[in-house]
Amino acid sequence: MRLSNVRLGHATNSSSSHSIVLLESQARDDLCGCTDMLEYGWENFTLGTSDAKRDYCRVAAFYHYTGLGLGDTEAACLANRAFGGPIVSTELLADSGIDHESIPHFPRPVGETDGMMPLWRWIERNVIEKDRVAILGGNDNEDDHPLSDSGKCFALPWGYEGAVRDHYRWDPQGYIATYNPATGKRLRWCLEDGTPPARSTWPELIDVKTTDCCDAGCAHCYQGSTPDGEHAKMDNLHSLAYQSRRMGVFEVALGGGEPTYHPQFAEILRTFHDSGVTPNFSTGSVIWLGDRGLMKAIVECCGSVALSVNSLRGDAVLGARDWLSVAIDSGVPSPALHVILGMQSENVLQCLMDVADRYYARVVLLKYQGGRGRAAATPPFDTEPSWQIVLNSETLKWGRLAVDSFLAAEVAARIPRADPVSYEVGDGRFSMYYDAVAGIAAPHSHASDDQREHVRVHDIERWWQGWQGRQRNAKAMRDLRVSVPADVSAGV
Ligand code: SF4
C-alpha cells in the first residue's frame, strides 16, 4: 500500500492492541488466542489466512453497524454483505467480541458514493486477500506478540476509540482519501502495487472567494479588492455548499476580499458546516473578534482560522501576538498565521516565528503572487534571506510549518529529507478556486485569464472534470514529445 500527500495530525493509543502487519514472508496459519466464538480480546492471537481475517473484519463491520444504532439482525445482514465467504449467524456475531479499545472506528463516507462498500472492498483487497498481511492481537501490559518483530506494522484508514471519526471518499481512480474534520489530517491510500494518484475525480478542497469588499488597501492585493467590492450572493453560496457535499469536498478555504465583511458570514460558515464540509478562512481584520454572534459560529463550525499578517495595519508582530492571544482565549479553532515569504525584514520574520512558537500556532508561508490587481505594480521579493530563519525555526522542528503549493518545490530543494509524498506541487489537481462573486472557476486564485472560466455553481463538477481531462491530455502530449527521438522529431 502507498500513502501519498500525508498531512499529519494527532495519534491515539489503546491498551489492547490489534495491529495489521506486513510480514517478511507469507503469513503463517492462524495461531491460538481467538476461539470459534469469534472473540478477539486481550490475549495474543494471529490471523493469517483469508478466512480468519475475513471473520475479524466481519465482526468489526458488525460493531460498526450496531454503533450506528442498527439492530443485531440488520447489522449482521450488512456485515455479511460487506465481506464474502460463508454467512455468519446473527447469534454468533451478537456474541462475538473485539476488545473495546481495539474496535476500529471506520471513517464515514462522503459524496455520492456507494456507502461503506468501497471501503469494505478496499479492506478485502489490501488486508484479507494479501498473503503477507496478518492481523496480530495482544496487549501492552505483557510481552510483545511473538511475531511483532517479523514484519512492518502499518496504519489503515481508520481510527480507534476516542478519536473523531474520519471522513472518507472513494475515488474511481483507485484510491481512498480520508480526512479528519477535527485535525485536518488528510491522506490518500492506494494499493501496494498502484501508482500514487495524480488527480482526483472531484476536488478535495475549494478555495472560495466570498466577497470583493475590503478596506485594507494593501499594495500586494492581487484581487484588487476595495471597500465598494461586491459580496457573493447567498443563493450561490448555499448552492455551492450543496454541490460540495454532493462531490464529497472535505474543506473550503473562504477568502475575499475580507471574508468577515460579508454581512452573512456566520450563515455561510453554518451552511458549509451543516453540509458536512469544514469551513476555514483567512482574515486581515480583527474586528470580528468582538462580534459575539459571528464568534459563536466560528467556534462551532470552523476547522482553522488564519491571520494574514502582511495585511495588518501597524506593527505586524504586536498585531499577530495580540490576535493569537485573544483568538486562543476565545476558542477560535487552530489559529494560524499567514506570512508572505520575503515581504518582511528578517527581524520581523524572526519575531513572527517566535510569536507563533510561543502560542504553538501554525505558520503558513505563502509565495508572493504579483501580476494581478494592485500587485501588478509590485515586483517579487527576494526570499533567500528568509529561508535560513524558516529552516532554523522551532515551528518547523515541531511540525507546525506549512507552505502553499507554490513554495513546495522551493522547500523540498532546501530540506532534502522532505518526502515527496508529503507535499503537493501546484494547484488544480486536488483543489480548485471558485469566485462566488463573479461566478468564475479556475485551478487556483492567481490563475491566468485563459485558465479562468465563467461557470455556474451547478456546473462546477463538469468544469472540474473537463479541466482534469485537458491537463491529462496536455501531459500525454508532453510525454509523447519526450519519448520521440530528437532526430525523428526534427524531421517531422
Ligand atoms: S490583500 Fe487581503 S487584506 Fe489586503 S486589500 Fe486584498 S483582500 Fe484586503
Image (tube, rainbow, N blue to C red):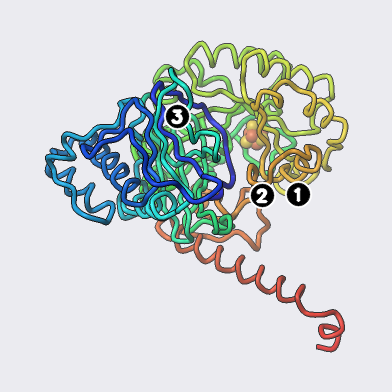
Please report whichever mark, 2 or 1, sits nearer to the chain's N-terminal start.
1
Nearer to us in this view, 487 or 53: 53
Residue at the spot of label 2:
446
Residue shown at 71% from the left, 43% from the top: 408
Residue density around tag 3, few if under 14, some if 14–19, many if 20 or more, within 10 Å: some
Eye-nearest disc, 2 or 1: 2
Residue 34 position in % (x across, y down): 29, 35
Report the Cα–Cα distance between label 2 and label 1.
9 Å
Give the label on residue 182, or none. Answer: 3
In this rendering, position of residue 204 left or right of residue 100: right
Please report whichever mark, 3 or 1, sits nearer to the chain's N-terminal start.
3
Type of the residue with mark 3: Ala
Residue at the spot of label 1:
371
- Label 1: which secondary element: loop
- State the image quarter where residue 309 is shown: top right
Nearer to us in this view, 395 or 236: 395
Nearer to us in this view, 91 or 49: 49
Nearer to us in this view, 387 or 147: 147
Circle 2/circle 1 CB separation < 8 Å? yes
In this rendering, position of residue 449 left or right of residue 15: right
Residue 353 position in % (x across, y down): 73, 21
Circle 3/circle 1 CB separation < 8 Å? no
Residue shown at 36% from the left, 52% from the top: 50
- Label 2: which secondary element: loop
Q: Examine the rendering and report whether any part of residue 203 can be seen.
A: yes
Residue density around tag 2, few if under 14, some if 14–19, many if 20 or more, within 10 Å: some
Residue shown at 46% from the left, 41% from the top: 156
Residue lying furthest bottom: 491
Report the Cα–Cα distance between label 3 and label 2.
29 Å
Eye-nearest disc, 3 or 1: 3
Report the Cα–Cα distance between label 3 and label 1.
36 Å
Q: How many callouts does the rendering have? A: 3
